[in-house]
Image: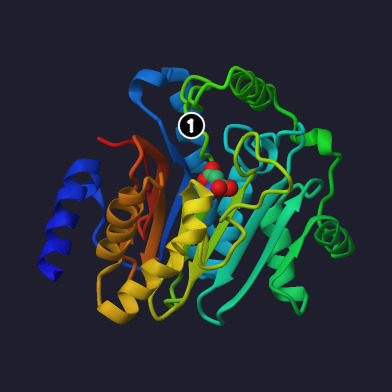
């Protein structure tokens, strides 16, 4: 079984070109900007440059925190805030639209040192939901707050509040219109979009280990285009879209949230490490490329362990991702190979 998992890991590493991964070492930060039908053919040079620049900016922001001896928790929040403020990613500013033409955002954060966690779901006026999730974790007695209550809490905590129109972007609006048309014509969903957008999964996330060996994970999303009736995905659910425990790993996911919830993806990866002794790469591959793939659950994760070993498997055509280690050089990858 162990041998099989190892063979699988080697195959997957070869297939995704992630053999460029650095040797393990602390501190380490890994980010993602969503997985899906992301191919060279669907990307313009201009658009790819924008994605790369945004991912590098996010890596640098997180690394700056780690390099000055800051905590992994501060690093993942800093990285995710950069991606939330960027219109290309389905989180914060670039959030997708619900069926009713609203933007309802979800986010969560977890501290692997203390096992504390915080999350918000279905918020519409908080500029940076990841910071609201952190406020829930640190400044309330609760783990998860939803809707109006979460917004009241964040406002009371002094977080930046914006008019819902802040989240309106033309490309996301057009995506919704296309989806509504398809629904009316009863066509199956497709993943077309802007050049290089090419996907319905655009969640952002970050995982990190700091100098002390403490792990943290953060995830933020607008959810899925055309979601209905207050639908909440995996991103704000601890153990599904986000998980961190010093004894195993930190994980952030992107993909079809309903599958990530039912297969408790993030916790499952941690559990495989803890109870079966798998490495972070083996555990993440097992869940993404075997379990999820086997049931048609599309997506990917980023993960890091306490030594700075990282994994970034995905079972889609591409995943926006990047990592930065102690040398401070940002690495970004988009396609399968
Ligand atoms: N996982 C997110 C959700 O289901 C979507 C994404 O990754 O883009 O809400």
Name the quadrant of the N terminus: bottom left
Where residue 279 sits: x, y (%)?
25, 69
**With respect to residue 70, does 11 lie above or below?**
above
Residue nearest the viewer, comparing 96 with 246:
96
Q: Tell me which corner region of the image, top left, top right, bottom left or bottom right, holds residue 335.
A: top left
Tell me what residue is drawn at x 66 percent, y 38 percent: 95
Q: Specify whether 158 is left or right of 94.
A: right
Q: Is residue 161 visible?
A: yes
Picture residue at 49% right of the left edge, 22% below the top = 192
Q: Is residue 39 above or below residue 213?
A: above
Q: How is the image coloured?
A: rainbow
State the image coordinates of residue 253 (x, y, percent, origin top left).
47, 54
Disc 1 is placed on an element classified as loop
Q: Which residue is mark 1?
A: 199
Relative side of 211 to 14, left or right:
right
Q: Image check: 300 left or right of 290?
A: right
Label 1 neighbour load within 10 Å: few <14, some 14-19, many 20+: many
**In the image, 50: left or right of 328?**
right
Label 1 within 8 A of ligand 1 by Cβ: yes
Q: Is residue 313 visible?
A: no
Picture residue at 55% right of the left edge, 79% below the top: 115
Q: Quarter of the image containing the C terminus?
A: top left
């Amino acid at each position: 079984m162990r041998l099989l998992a190892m063979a699988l890991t080697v195959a997957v590493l070869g297939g995704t070109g992630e053999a460029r991964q650095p040797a393990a070492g602390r501190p380490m930060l890994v980010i993602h900007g969503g997985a899906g039908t992301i191919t060279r053919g669907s990307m313009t040079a201009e658009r790819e440059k924008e994605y790369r620049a945004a991912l590098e900016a996010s890596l640098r922001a997180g690394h700056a925190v780690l390099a000055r001896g800051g905590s992994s928790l501060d690093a993942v929040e800093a990285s995710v805030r950069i991606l939330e403020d960027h219109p290309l990613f389905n989180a914060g500013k670039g959030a997708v639209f619900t069926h009713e033409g609203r933007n309802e955002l979800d986010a969560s954060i977890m501290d692997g040192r203390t096992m504390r966690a915080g999350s918000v779901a279905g918020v519409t006026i908080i500029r940076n939901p990841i910071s609201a999730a952190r406020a829930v974790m640190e400044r309330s007695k609760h783990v998860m707050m939803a809707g109006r209550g979460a917004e009241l809490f964040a406002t009371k905590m002094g977080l930046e509040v914006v008019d819902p129109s802040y989240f309106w972007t033309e490309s996301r609006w057009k995506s919704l219109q296309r989806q509504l048309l398809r629904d009316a014509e009863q066509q199956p969903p497709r993943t077309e979009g802007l050049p290089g957008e090419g996907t319905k999964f655009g969640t952002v996330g970050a995982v990190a280990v700091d100098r002390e060996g403490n792990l943290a994970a953060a995830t933020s999303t607008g959810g899925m285009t055309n979601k209905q009736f207050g639908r909440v995905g995996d991103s704000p659910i601890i153990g599904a879209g986000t998980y961190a425990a010093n004894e195993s790993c930190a994980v952030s996911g992107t993909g079809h949230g309903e599958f990530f919830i039912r297969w408790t993806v993030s916790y499952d990866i941690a559990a495989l490490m803890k109870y079966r002794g798998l490495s972070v790469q083996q555990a993440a591959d097992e869940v993404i490329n075997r379990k999820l793939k086997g049931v048609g659950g599309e997506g990917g994760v980023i993960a890091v362990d306490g030594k700075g070993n990282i994994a970034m498997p995905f079972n889609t055509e591409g995943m926006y991702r990047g990592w930065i280690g102690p040398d401070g050089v940002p690495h970004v990858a988009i396609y399968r190979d």
